[in-house]
Image (cartoon, grey):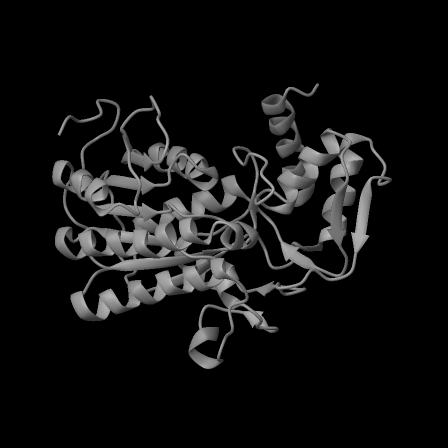
Amino acid sequence: MTQNPETPTQDSQQTQGTQRTQATRVLVTGGLGFIGSNLVPALRERRHEVWVCDLGHSEGPNYIRCDVSKYRQLEKIFEQHDFDYVYHLAAEYGRWNGEDYYENLWLTNVVGTKNLIRLQEKKRFRMIFFSSAEVYGDYGGVMSEDVMDKVPIKQMNDYATAKWAGELQVLNSAVMFSTETVRVRPVNAYGPHEYYSPYRGVIPAFIYKALRDEPYTVYLGHKRIFDYAEDTCRTFANIVDNFKPGEVYNVGSKEEWEHEIKYVSDLILKCLGKGDSRVIYKEAEPFTTRVKHMDFSKARRDLDHDPKVPLEEGIPRTIEWMKKVYGFK
């Protein structure tokens, strides 16, 4: 395999839970997506040799086109390259996307994950599996990582169910084949590189609609913790340096940075100098929890999780990025 001349090669395998001092070879599936576009630079800053695979064509360095739901395409990558770590981000995102395009959701999020696990069982790389805080479903208390071990949880949509199925596949493989994986449950990341889609999060949707003076809906009484992607991707990149097989982490911003959705909308409109005449206010949205109280203490303890950017700073940065991308002055 040809080495990237700008990054050192990987060497010895890290022992469990210890610090790795030499560069490693890392594959990021779904690396062209929102989280991947923020994570890949964070990994490269640490002098890792980073490769990316995704569905689209790209002229970026160390890029391989691949559909993870197709085993042959994924297998070909691992026949040609060896990796120490794989960050598995490739997935169909979102509740309503999962309802409208459920075939893609289950093929990518479940079959695709199983394909990668089968290769992990053969090639013995370590994996970071990206789940979602959606797996906590209808739980009304503080969402710590051990909730599922204590309380029966009902996931509330196909997206959440598929992510939980992925976690169960990971856990089963660890028992049956001694594979080593860390699971992460991101919360509500936002920031540059998240393009507008009706299926994406509320922040890009609100900004895009407000920029175009189009109506959008705000559901009252819902509270969420929003995390600036650059912050959380630093934490994700830290996993390589303190990899603990079998662990699972909530990764978001800070517990005290919990806001009502209306506050997010108000902040966006304030930054844009606009009123709320086009905002449609409704009561609680169906098929989702009204409030998600998160616990990030494990990520702080093990992964040096230290968010820097509050919503009041991250929103203006995101607005400026979206203005540039969509041609607004």
> Residue 49: where, in percent of width, then height?
25, 34
Q: Position of residue 172 (x, y in %)?
A: 26, 69
Front position in the image: 12 or 54 = 54
Seen in the image, is 34 located left or right of residue 10? right
Q: Where, quadrant-wise, is the N terminus in this rendering? A: top left
Q: How many marks?
A: 0
Q: Is residue 29 left or right of residue 286?
A: left
Q: Is residue 296 visible?
A: no
x, y (%) of residue 27? 28, 40
Answer with the quarter of the image where residue 23 lies: top left
From the top left corner, tell me how far across and down residue 318 is, in percent. 62, 33
268 sits to left or right of 88 = right
The residue at 21%/61% (across/down) is: 179
Residue drawn at the location 51% of the way across and 43% of the way down: 231
In the displayed structure, 263 sits above or below 47; it is below
Image point (25%, 28%), residue name: 7
Residue at 52% from the left image edge and 42% from the top image edge: 229
Q: Quadrant of the C terminus?
A: top right
Say which of 34 and 251 sits in front: 34
Is any part of residue 110 visible from this angle? yes
Placement of 153 over or under 188, stated as above or below = below
Rendered view: 162 above or below 277: below
